[in-house]
Amino acid sequence: MVLASLGDQQAIAGCQNERVLPRSRTARLLAGLFIVLLVAIPLALSTPWAQALVFERATAWARGRFGIDIRAAAFGYRLTSLTARLGDVTVADLATPDRPFLRIGELDLDLAASALGGRLDFDAIRVRQATLTLDRTTRSAHGARASAAPAATRAAPPPFEIGTLQVDGLDLALGLGDEDNTRVAVRQISSSLR
């Protein structure tokens, strides 16, 4: 009788282990799936297709919010270091997209860790070979009326911080009144903003 009850106890314990075993397999499967997703999502976001989508969303936001057209021949980012690099960038008024007021050869953006929380802060911005042109050709026909509009109707940029702004090679072309021939060449500007 004692042997039978001992065998029954082992059989009951075996059944209990069988019940536990599928649960532990499920837990291992879920943990493995979580790890795969943890690796796959950043890899997917680093694809050229995803980067093009991010650039399109950012430029659509700038068009809608500030009325500017931003284009770049090259765009890429690294999620691990929160950096982005743009090449051959042009910025123009929506009414005159073929006449940009700002051209940048290379733009490097280092986002601050607070960007992960939704705040647009920069540790550093580096601009190389920029040309800023402010004259009649880069202003839209409604530009004078827009600048005279009350401040409440214009979109204000969201609050943000820039740790360091470095500009290497800036060419300023300013049009003053009817004489659009004033040019200033600045070789380097470095600043630490607070």
Image (cartoon, rainbow, N blue to C red):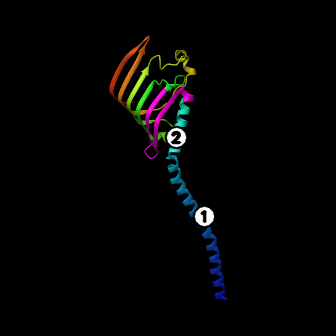
Q: Position of residue 1 (x, y in %)?
A: 67, 89
Q: Quadrant of the C terminus?
A: top left
The answer to whether residue 78 is magenta is yes
- 86 vs 8, left or right, is left
- Check residue 53 in the rendering and tell me which mark sits there, or answer none: none
- 190 vs 91, left or right, is left
- Check residue 26 in the rendering and tell me which mark sits there, or answer none: 1
Spatial distance from mark 2 to mark 1, Cα to Cα? 37 Å
Marks 2 and 1 close (CB-CB < 8 Å): no
Q: At 57% across and 21% down in the image, what residue appears?
A: 152
- Mark 2, Cα crowd under 10 Å, few <14 / some 14-19 / many 20+, is some
Q: In which quadrant of the rendered view does residue 151 lie?
A: top right
Q: Give 174 or 2, whichever is nearer the viewer.
A: 174
Q: Secondary structure at mark 1?
A: helix
The magenta stretch is: 63-91
Q: Position of residue 123 (x, y in %)?
A: 41, 37
Q: Is residue 59 above or below residue 177?
A: below
Q: In which quadrant of the rendered view does residue 31 lie?
A: bottom right
- 28 vs 176, left or right, is right
Mark 1: which amino acid?
A: Thr
Q: Overall secondary structure of the magenta stretch?
A: strand
Q: Position of residue 30 (x, y in %)?
A: 58, 60
Mark 2: which amino acid?
A: Ala
